Image (cartoon, coloured by chain):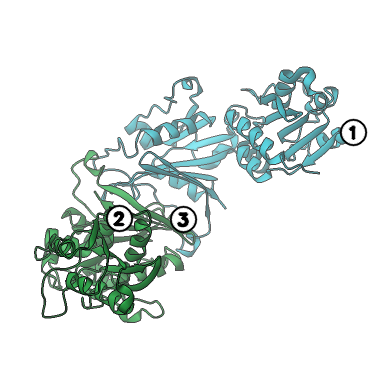
Chain colours: A green, B cyan
Amino acid sequence: MGHLSDGRWMAAALMLSHRSRGRTAPNPNVGCVLVNDGAVVGRGWTQPGGRPHGEAMALAEAGARARGATCYTTLEPCAHRSHRGPTCSNLLIEAGVARVVIALRDPDPRTDGAGADRLRAAGIDVTTGVLEAEARLAMAGFLTRQAKGRPHVTLKLATSLDGRIALPSGESRWITGPQARAHAHLERARHEAILVGRGTWEIDRPRLDVRLAGLEHRAPRRLVLSSTGDLRSPSDIAGLEGVDHLLVEGGAEAAAAFLRAGLVDRLLLYRAPILLGTGKPALGDIGLPDLASAHGRWSLLDARQLGSDRLEVYANS
Amino acid sequence: MGHLSDGRWMAAALMLSHRSRGRTAPNPNVGCVLVNDGAVVGRGWTQPGGRPHGEAMALAEAGARARGATCYTTLEPCAHRSHRGPTCSNLLIEAGVARVVIALRDPDPRTDGAGADRLRAAGIDVTTGVLEAEARLAMAGFLTRQAKGRPHVTLKLATSLDGRIALPSGESRWITGPQARAHAHLERARHEAILVGRGTWEIDRPRLDVRLAGLEHRAPRRLVLSSTGDLRSPSDIAGLEGVDHLLVEGGAEAAAAFLRAGLVDRLLLYRAPILLGTGKPALGDIGLPDLASAHGRWSLLDARQLGSDRLEVYANS
């Protein structure tokens, strides 16, 4: 049975899970908070490379204070043995945790309910489904890999109000302001790989790094889409090992190729309050047969102001 | 001296002024509220064609209850005689109004401070400058005509997220949903004239009417921009008699011509949550020499959700 404060603590666990988005593949980026007597006694998130798991990190921090505590975790604790580390459901039982609140059942067939069952069998009170929708967004990379066998794909566009990404001369620095560009760099840090099309790679020579103080080491792997590049077609992303989050940064033809293939899960749209008129369009041909088929595909997830620019985040629905 | 409730009552007067936006040229669309003992005793707004003035209408409604009342008016009451009706400053004095609160001084050289002076000379307490910025927006048509000798120009764009207004086939019905289209029709009712380019006129044959129940009679005058049309160039708008608010509805070349000429004061941007890829761009060449000169021109005035679409209103700054 749920408690009134469950949503609040799970929201804290979700914040922690975002810390390792893009750094844990093929493992999920789990966030975990241990609460005892109304106070946080341990916090954890899956560490780079996938180990330790979030629950293990939180338990290590809590030590003896884990006894009688409630564990909030964004994903069902694992039930399967691994040579890489301990099994989280066992760790929670051994630590004497009284209650476990889970956002999302683990779709990995080696757990898939077995973790929660083991906890219940040990006399632990288990609640599931708290902030499940938010957890699906927070761990979208792992979940997309599990469900579709490919990375979760985000397409980034930075445009003028009239949908242009450069002047006819090619001048594109800058459309958006410093806050929007900093946000885009933070997004890079949360993806295992960035992809650009061949034209963008050869003409713009983008650095595709993370220019944020303290996060420089989090520059993702760089990929080029071309007949001779890392990927020949968008569908080749299924074979990318260690990449559960892919950020497509353009240009217009690469972006269109992913949209045409139905391989964009999330759209990051940075828009500057400027008009450009003629210039480079944001997208090439995305293969729409008619206008009706354009509708109903995108739903607004989030929107915020970044300086004078606006960021809108859409999910493919 | 101002009173705490002045802003609230002036906001009510501004709402009334919006009722006759686009119907009073060459007169200003003034809104007026008479308040006595904390209650509204009269409401008025400039009537179609420009007479009666808002103050006259509010005084007629209030009758004897105007004695000792406060008059909230969006524009300084007129001081000049006209064969078309009485002078509002005199009417207010004769009615025994105790106080007059004014948003904006009348730039018409026949009044321009003389209305307020006459009220003060008659012993009436006069406060000015309440919600002045809002009043500038509400009466932008009159003010632009006074200051620049031309109508106030609004450019309407209805685009996809990537700035397209039609598929390559020309299919454009519909990009936006019913709420956004209804809002666009309400905007038509608030302009004396709508302009489209020759291509739009000949190919789309737009009806350019107001399809809103009860407002069908408010369809504005229709103008075509072309070498043989009503206007040969955007600068010809100065000569449009009886038009203080002009709505430019496209297409891309007509819109660009107005932007190139620096003749767009307000931008209405309706955006649907769809991507179109290739297709017709919103704008033609607006004559930008470089990217830096695109910045700093537009400031966000208002934004709202209309069904699944978003409306943003920008002012040329």
N-terminal of the pair, mark 2 or mark 3, is 2
- The amino acid type of the residue labelled 3 equals Pro
Q: Residue at x 23, y 67 (%)?
A: A245
**In x, y percent, where is residue B1?**
81, 44
Q: Residue at x 35, y 31 (%)?
A: B202
Residue linked to disc 1: B123
Q: Residue at x 53, y 53 (%)?
A: B299
Q: For the residue labelled by badge 3, is the local secondary structure a helix, a strand or a loop?
A: loop
Q: Chain of mark 1?
A: B
Q: Are marks 2 and 3 on the same chain?
A: yes
| Residue B228 in sight in this render | no
Answer with the quarter of the image where residue A7 lies.
Answer: bottom left
**In x, y percent, where is residue A302?**
37, 54
Answer with the quarter of the image where residue A3 lies.
Answer: bottom left
Q: Considering only vertical position in the picture, is B53 above or below A204?
A: above
Q: Is residue A196 left or right of residue B85?
A: left
Q: Nearer the viewer, mark 2 or mark 1?
A: 2
Residue linked to disc 2: A131
Q: Residues within 10 Å of mark 2 (few under 14, many from 20)?
A: some
Q: Nearer the viewer, residue A168 or A208?
A: A208
Q: Residue at x 85, y 22 (%)?
A: B94
Q: Nearer the viewer, residue B3 or A54?
A: A54
**In x, y percent, where is residue B307?**
37, 38
Q: For the residue labelled by badge 2, is the local secondary structure a helix, a strand or a loop?
A: loop
Residue linked to disc 3: A273
Cα distance between the residues tagged 2 and 1: 66 Å
